[in-house]
Amino acid sequence: MTKPRIYITRRLPEDVVAPYRKDLDIEMWSETDVPVDHTHLQKEAVTADGLVTMLTENVDEELLGKAENLKIVANLAVGYDNIDVQAAKRRDIQVTNTPDVLTDTTADLIFGLVLATARRLTEAERYIKEGKWENWSPLLMAGTDVHHKTMGIVGMGRIGKMIAKRARGFDMNVLYHNRSRDEEAEDQFNASYATFDDLLTKADYVVCMVPLTRETEGMFNKNTFRKMKNTAIFINGSRGQTVIEADLYEALIHEDIAGAGLDVFAEEPISKDHPLLQLDQVVALPHIGSASKETRYKMMDLCLENIDRYFKGKSVKTPVSNR
């Protein structure tokens, strides 16, 4: 019996892939860190029964239309805005993602961004490595406190809740804004629901954790930043497209807000010449929210397990809803 052909768009560690080779015919893109180009992916998709994709791959209507054998796409991420889910649904193609296994790891990173931005950690590191530490003064590299401040979380999903949990450990007051109230978050983390505008005006740290949709695209813009405190810090761990980056830059240089911690950008990889990267009050990371070795291994295994279960006639563990 012919094994289902699976194409993976990155070279994954063999110890992750090996247990699945018995039942799946697995091929991988030859490069570890370089994304597969779209033309090559389309060519591979034509004969693939299953795909393992990353956020950088655009699984669009054109690709799905050519992939006549394709039965399942397993996305190595929580988000799946790189996949045309409705086009997949029309072709009865299963789509899966990797929630839950990265929740705590991502929350750790986002809270690390809060601390790094507030306490000017990366700026201070550059200062000492560049040999500028010759004297001491009372306000040398003085940042701002995190403890007992107000955190406003926009998007109280799994990760948002774990960020709230960490904030409570710092005795922070937690506000949140969501499409609907979340009584579990309110009970467990003493979080208070707020309108979007109310959260913006009251929070010392505004943390964006929303999925990318038509409604959330560009939701942080000139008007948004002007409503925030001029001492506030903006943190983005969701998608770069939720922010108008030119407006964020203007807000920072005009001191409408005090700083920004960013793990995501509108275009990735971001150019080293991007205006935001020239500002000391910006802490920038290369989209590494879930990048611990333990978690990335769990994500890779979950993708392959979903595919393996699908072709064995079992329910996949983490299906994406076809909304």
Image (cartoon, helix red, strand yellow):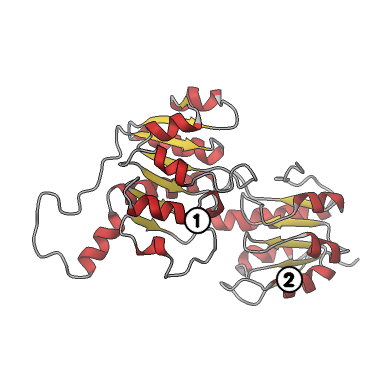
Task: Tell me if mark 1 has few (under 14), some (14-19) or many (20+) residues whose alpha carbon lies within 10 angstroms of its own.
Answer: many
Indicate the secondary structure of the residue bearing disc 2: helix
Residue 191 higher or lower than 42, as above or below: above
Q: Quadrant of residue 180?
A: top right
- In the picture provided, is 206 more to the left or to the right than 13? left
Q: Nearer the viewer, residue 174 or 24?
A: 174
Q: Position of residue 203 (x, y in %)?
A: 38, 34
Q: Nearer the viewer, residue 240 or 78?
A: 240
Q: Position of residue 140 (x, y in %)?
A: 15, 54
Circle 2 sits on which residue?
41
Q: Position of residue 295 (x, y in %)?
A: 54, 53
**Residue pushed farthest right?**
1
- In the picture provided, is 3 more to the left or to the right than 147? right
**Mark 2–mark 1 distance (CA, rounded to whole Å):** 24 Å
Task: Specify the amino acid type for callout 1.
Answer: Val
Q: Residue at x 61, y 47 (%)?
A: 212
Task: Specify the amino acid type for callout 2.
Answer: Leu
Q: Nearer the viewer, residue 233 or 10?
A: 233
Indicate the secondary structure of the residue bearing disc 1: loop
Residue 220 higher or lower than 156, as above or below: below
Circle 1 sits on which residue?
264
